[in-house]
Amino acid sequence: MTPLSGRWPRSYPIRARRLRDAGIPYVEIATRLEVPFGTVVFWLLSPEARARKRQSDRERNAVTQKPGHLYLGLIEQCASCGERGYVYLRWQLQVKSGRRAFNWDVSHRSGHERHCFFALRLWSGSRINFASPIREQEFRELVGVA
Ligand SMILES: [Zn+2]
């Protein structure tokens, strides 16, 4: 059984519940369905407990990390693929330390939207046609380049 992008067939939690109701131990259910034990435990939580767990996971992430982005402007030749694109600076703010982990996100919109996503250190941001001088200044202040 191969998971599709981390999801399991909808029938699996139902099967897990049926097995539980038939008195099968959780470990045995995990083995039979070839699903990680923790996943089985999650499926077999009451709907209320599951909702509480989702909420607390969300809150924990919201407290420790905050995503952000800034649209910078156009680039004629993307540093990754060489095509014309719209340049965004994206980051995850580590709330405790106040540090930001930056990445480039170049959006290409020829027909369908495609993104080039790469680490800040891989490109200096040279030859961006900034949307405005204020954008350029914000960018330099964010990444600490004079
Ligand atoms: Zn690209």
Image (cartoon, rainbow, N blue to C red):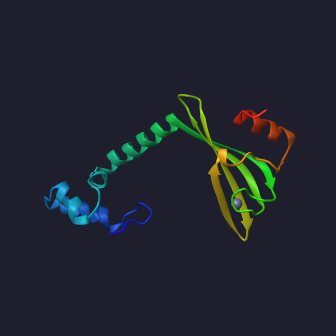
Q: In this view, does 42 lie to the left or right of 81?
A: left
Image position of 52 with respect to 2: above or below: above
Q: Which residue is drawn at 59% across and 29% down?
A: 98
Q: Residue at x 80, y 54 (%)?
A: 74
Residue 102 screen position, x and y as percent: 63, 42
**Quarter of the image with the C terminus in it:** top right
- Residue 8 x %, y %: 37, 64
The quarter in which the N terminus is drawn is bottom left
- Name the quadrant containing residue 115: bottom right
| Residue 24: quadrant of the picture | bottom left
- Residue 39 lies left or right of residue 61; in this view the side is left
Q: In which quarter of the image is residue 30?
A: bottom left
Above or below for 80 versus 50: below
Outermost residue on the left side: it is 23
Work out whether 90 lies above or below 60: below
Position of residue 4 measured from the top left corner of the image (x, y, whole percent): 42, 66
Q: Which residue is drawn at 63% across and 52% down?
A: 118
Query: In which of the image's four quarters is ligand 1 placed?
Result: bottom right
Q: Depth check: 27 or 54 in front?
A: 27
Measured along the vertical axis of the image, is residue 27 above or below residue 141? below
Counting every numbered tag in the picture gives 0
Taking the spot 66% from the left edge, 64% from the top edge, the residue there is 114
Q: In this orientation, which residue lies closer to the viewer: 114 or 28?
A: 114
Question: Would residue 61 appear left or right of 3 to someone viewing this image?
Answer: right
- Furthest residue toward right: 133
Q: Residue 92's x, y, as percent?
A: 58, 41
Residue 81 horizontal side relative to residue 50, left or right:
right
